[in-house]
Image (cartoon, rainbow, N blue to C red):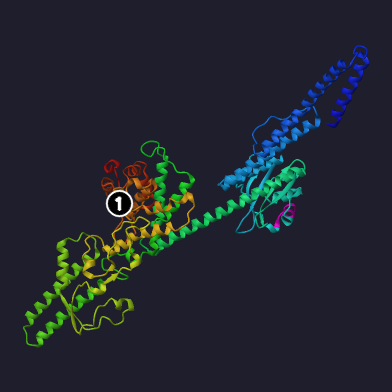
Amino acid sequence: MHLHITLLAVALVAATGLVLRQFGEVIPGPGEFGLLLVAVAVVALLASRRIAAPLAELAEQAEAVRRFDFGDHPLVRSPVREIDQLGGAFDLMRDAVRRFLRMNRRLATETDLEALQPWLLDKMVDLAGARGGVLYLVDAATDALVATAMDAEGGKARANPGMPPLPQAGLPRLMADARATMQPANGHLRDGELEAIGLDPGFAGFGTLALPLRDRREQLLGMLLLFKDGEIDAANARFIEALAASAATSLETRELLRGQKALLEATIRMVAGAIDAQSPYTGGHCERVPELTFMLARAACAAREGPYAGFDLDPEEWEALHIGAWLHDCGKVTTPEHVVDKATKLETVYDRIHEIRTRFEVLKRDADIAYWRGRAEGGDEAALGDQRDALKAMLDEEFAFVAECNVGGEYLSPEKQRRLRDIGARRWLRTLDDRLGLSRDELARHPGATAALPVEEPLLADKPQHRIARPAEEAIPEDNRWGFRMDVPELLYNRGELHNLSVSRGTLTAEERYKINEHMVLTIRMLGELPFPRHLRAVPEIAGGHHEKLDGTGYPRRLDREQLSPLARMMAIADIFEALTAADRPYKPGKTLSQALAIMANMRKDNHIDPELFELFLRTGVHRDYAGRFMLPEQIDEVRIEDYL
């Protein structure tokens, strides 16, 4: 540029001299000479502006770069060679920075590690002008380098190429040097080395750059191999190294996130497995309900008509549903096993019908004793025998009735409840102190002083010691922050014999029913205490809503349709259908397909479950698909969908 300006100045001076020599006689005075100087100045000004214009444009573009404006700008050209070269270099610099920022943005925002790895390799190959490359990451379990992406064609990388893992102790020399120094290594890989690591020996003819990827602790995270026709120049290598450092940070972050998700997933399945393992009768419930929920959610996403046309879940919503479904019963870890598995009305940690049987046996022995006592006193043998036999037959029949009531298979009418009370009014003689051998807590429930022995007692009784008080901390205030609206029984448990035997349906008392329902309270409270990230904040609502009803009569918060998300309503249908058809419950056999759907159809009419989701459940065949996977063959009978709609 200095040469151009110098030549221009000399030319201007020479031109001025020539003009003066040529027209010296014509220009008589200073006026004409002034005009000549003005003309020369104008020419010089125009020439300088032509030279300065590209510099001004470069200054504007530099200011735009300073403002991080990397939009498209025209290439600055100039007749001055140095300015022209500067314009070209500036354009290349801007393009490099723009690509660097775009790649960093993708590295920072991409959440799919499997998609990120081949994309990153493609960009590296493109920046280096390479013929191909391989991206390796260190396996956390074995420390071997595992190929996660390979580009053998230049710009067409594929994930998981299936190449053999490379133990770090047996790396090819070039890769071993890069690992040892944690610096890029330039060179070549021999045919045998390429074959040993699963690459085409044809790459032996190319120059190879082995670039180690380091994590935040300067430990080896992975390695990048690039193959090029010639050596990768130093400037390009430095740019690739800088980008690789940024990529390594992003890959490490993604790997940490994936590891944390894997840990969370394992923890979730561990909790669900522990809940299922808690009871041999409900094993699999925490697995089957999520699977049925996912089947229904996929059917809703695939709907092209009806109320759920246009319904869709993004990956983050699927993640929230996955966690909520698997943890929907996490509160059951606190529910006593004997309550969950209560197969008979008198069952606690054992079936107390055996105590009742022993009392009947005592009464039968008393009948025998009364018979022999009457004989000893000279009574009539036949009459005494008939009396004894009639009493023993009555006791046998009454015990059979009590035992039948204990099973709880059918509705217990008021008449049967009255008969239980009549049978329970029979007296038997206790001769042993009922306080001996008791725990401190149970002894504290016995009122007053010990009765004088022997003492007569009712055959079936509801005693004060059967009433177990509810701890004050288990009370639920009306203004509780979770919005629970449940009727809490006065007692924690009532183990009265008549109280339990008189349960009209099923085997659970009101106290035990609440104890089971309470698992929803604990599920919501437990999940509500977890610091879920923003996209998972719906997990407690999804997990905690599957016992709510659309008419607002469910539990634990009595939410109605408008307060329940579609995912919570899906969970409700899944939980009900699984519970009805499960063949592993101790207190009932699994329903057939038609029986379960008939019950759910009534729940649909009563506005307990979502009628639109129930119709989708039927019309898309989700019920049939689930039955084929999880129900016994004898439970699967023919159904007509129209009968339930």
Q: Which residue is mark 1?
A: 592
Q: In the picture shown, does residue 468 fall above or below 541?
A: below
At 69% from the left and 39% from the top, the residue drawn is: 96
Percent from the top left, x then y, of residue 32?
Answer: 86, 15
At 36% from the left and 37% from the top, the residue drawn is: 306
Q: Residues within 10 Å of mark 1 (few under 14, many from 20)?
A: many
Percent from the top left, x then y, of residue 300?
Answer: 40, 42
Residue 204, by quadrant, is top right
Observer-nearest of 637 and 124: 124
Q: In the picture shown, does residue 468 fall above or below 294?
A: below
Quadrant in which the C terminus appears: top left
Q: In the picture shown, does residue 275 fall above or below 134?
A: below
Observer-nearest of 173 and 46: 46
Question: From the viewer's perspective, is 185 left or right of 282?
Answer: right
User: Is residue 87 within the magenta segment?
Assistant: no
Q: Which residues are magenta?
A: 170-178
Work out which residue is located at the far top of the displayed protein and give it. Answer: 26
Percent from the top left, x then y, of residue 531?
Answer: 48, 56
Residue 362, by quadrant, is bottom left
Percent from the top left, x then y, of residue 322?
Answer: 45, 51
User: Is residue 174 within the magenta segment?
Assistant: yes
Q: Main secondary structure of the magenta part?
A: helix
Question: From the viewer's perspective, is 138 left or right of 54?
Answer: left
Question: From the viewer's perspective, is 182 left or right of 365?
Answer: right
The amino acid at mark 1 is: Thr
